[in-house]
Amino acid sequence: MSIPSSFIDQLIDQADIVEVVGRRLQLNKKGSNFWCLCPFHDDSNPSMAVNQDKQFFYCFVCQESGNAIHFLRQYENLDFVDAIETLASSLGLTVPYENSKHDKIKPSGLVEQAVRFYQKNLNDKIAEKAIQYLKNRNITGETAKKFNLGFAEDKWDALSMHLGKDIPVNELEASGLFSHKDNKFYDRFRGRIIFPIRNIKGEFIAMGGRIIDEGEPKYLNSPETAFFNKSNELFGLFEVKEAEKKIASLIVVEGYMDVIGLYQHGIKNAVATLGTAVTPSHVAKIMRYTNKIFFAFDGDLAGGKAAWKAVENTFPIIREDVNIHFVFFEEKHDPDSFINEFGLQAFQKLLDESMSLSEYFLSKVKDFNLETLEGRSQAAKFAIPVISKINNAVIKEIYANEVSKLCGMDVKSMHVPQESYKTNQSSNQSKASPAIPVRVKALINIFSALLKHPSLAQQDVFKNLKEDAKFNFLFDVIDLYQKSPDIKPSRVLETLESEQIQGYFSQAVIAELDLSEENALKLIEDCINVLLKNQKEREQILKDKYNVSSITSVERRDLQQIILKKEEIADDDRDWLKKLSSNQD
Ligand SMILES: [Zn+2]
């Protein structure tokens, strides 16, 4: 099912963001904007501007931004369809779902059929061992049903027989449910308990299987497919969201059995990564749904490593209003085995006594021998790169201060990289917003100029950027303005894929530069030069790296691309290309 884009256009046209936000937050008009306390960070002064003309909101501190649909999604934790539903119902409109051409061949449909097939197996006599396994782990039939658990027989063709012969090969392939050998498809999951994985919309997109008898691997997951990206999905998140609209807290664990075991004992807010460490996109996703997070990993070495990985991936997006805690188990225990042995209250106590992110981080620093000069310098060497990952200037300063105390160093001599730290010290008048890199500033200016004078999209000033795929998004925007010069900014935003670029575009919308057409064109030319010069500098940096043999293979390819894209390739360039393509060790 999909929603026609003409309806989304109509909705954006008819909805008034001032009304949407105003119904939920106290707005005050000042100048051309309405202002309110930003709900997306811990705000004490109104930092969020809502602009009626542009149908846009923007927070000057946390930089959350977008149109009415974005606001609803963020504010009420809604997915796109739910946000559309909410907005439509407030306007008294009914969403006209349509069967899209793709629906029939949607590969995830096969996954759902497989889930139902395996689920039915679990009720049959054939799954005796599987049922015994679940009983031994104290999983009731009700819980098994809640998570749609199933059983795959130890056969090579049970599922393919069930699905029949009419399904096109490319669909079988795309589903991730089969392995493929000598032109034949074999069931991927055999002799396993099946744990279906759903996306946030509740669609079945993949599955995990635990082997019943002896055999390897113990756990097997669907491979990545067009609709299953394991570094983005969390097992159990849909089920938590289904039960709790505003999620108070989430417990992140390592395995599906942990999620299910905790659920069985009454802890219904656990989610699991799928055989990967916690990734940055996991953390971002979790922070979208709650601002209280517990990481509860196994009590072994791997669990310790997973916890540290979570720290590293949390630091870049940490905010003041997010509480992150770590629960550590004794060795040989994981969340499931712990709650089975000690019960709900003991688990609850672990949560209550969990270590905060900062305590955990500082405990790692204190692991060095801080009594000695060597130990202190090792500790600083360990801590500084980690702290430099923090983008929130206030939090970064707090961490830097703590570490400087422990290591007996002056904060300034710690050289925590990144501009935001510096800006925060020197300027209190502008709230702690990080300094904007010149490349980004250039991009925002180009957007500003286009917003003010959409006709500039017809000019060929942009052609020098055209060859670099990095700027494809810019040409998408230019294309939109060429086709429909009166397109609303909120509609343009809707087409941008990257959240980062959406942010830059939003900043341009709010900045409302007042420029004559002539000056706007001049601005665009200047900014394109900045972007190109940036590329030149990058070329030099990469060459320097090559010369000291610290170039990575990705950077090597990048450098090749930069040189190849030049209009004229000089002798020197040719030498570089030769160097870069030889000794690829
Ligand atoms: Zn904010």
Image: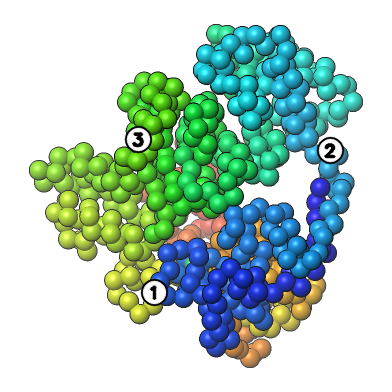
Mark 2 CB lies closer than 8 A to ligand 1? no
Label 1: which secondary element: loop
Q: Amino acid at mark 3?
A: Leu
Which residue carries the number 2 mark?
A: 105
Q: Looking at the image, is mark 2 or mark 1 earlier in the sequence? A: 2
The Cα–Cα distance between marks 2 and 1, rounded to whole angstroms, is 51 Å
x 76%, y 63%: residue: 88
x 55%, y 71%: residue: 25
The crowd level at tag 1 (other Cα within 10 Å; few <14, some 14-19, many 20+) is: few
Residue 540's place in the image compared with 523, above or below, is above
Which residue carries the number 3 mark?
A: 350
Which residue carries the number 1 mark?
A: 431
The front one of 257 and 434 is 257
The Cα–Cα distance between marks 3 and 2, rounded to whole angstroms, is 47 Å
Is 443 on the left-hand or right-hand side of 175? left
Q: Amino acid at mark 1?
A: Lys
- In the rendered image, residue 139, in percent from the top left (x then y), is placed at 56, 21
Residue 158's place in the image compared with 338, above or below, is above
Q: Amino acid at mark 2?
A: Ile
